[in-house]
Amino acid sequence: MARRTFNRPIARSAREDRTYLDVVYDSKLEMRRAAELEVLRRAGHIRAWYRQVPVQLGRDTSTRIDFLVIGLEYNWFEEPKGFDTPAFRSIKGLWLKYGPTKLHIFYPKGKSNWRIEVLARGSEARA
């Protein structure tokens, strides 16, 4: 009996769906936010943005946050999320205690809007 091979035609690579400016992002949400940050940078609303920034939270925990945004007056971190996982809920708790600056968490709200949750430590939360 002849061996059968199945070659499925792939119309579009999943990587293409997550690529912006020749960078492949971990998710479509992350890519969408990167595109928005680039528009803000080009318009002069922010100075710069960096992706996959390592952050130390306490002595025993380090994580990578999707974006560090260098604003005109202050800096902040951003993390686009489809939903909170148990691991990320743990990171949120540690951020409130050890986070270096504000963390803006972007949750999708429809196709083009975001619901934004801001986490900040102590006195930063009141500022």
Image (cartoon, rainbow, N blue to C red):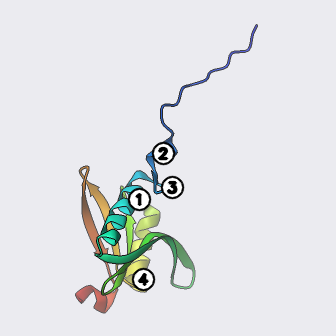
Label 2 residue SS: helix
Q: Cβ–Cβ below 8 Å for labels 1 and 4?
A: no
Residue 1 locus on image (x, y percent): 76, 7
Q: Earlier in the sequence, mark 2 or mark 1?
A: 2
In primary-sequence order, the first of circles 4 and 2 is: 2
How far apart, in angstroms, are the residues tagged by discs 4 and 3?
Answer: 31 Å
Disc 3 designates what residue? Answer: 22
Q: Residue furthest top?
A: 1
Residue drawn at point x = 51 percent, y = 84 percent: 58
Q: Amino acid at mark 1?
A: Glu
* N-term mark: 4 or 3: 3
Distance from disc 4 to disc 2, alpha carbons, whole Å, reads 33 Å
- Label 1 secondary element: helix
Find disc 1 in the rendering and name its residue.
Answer: 30
Which amino acid, by three-letter code, is at mark 4?
A: Gly
Q: Which residue is mark 2?
A: 16
Residue ID for mark 4: 99
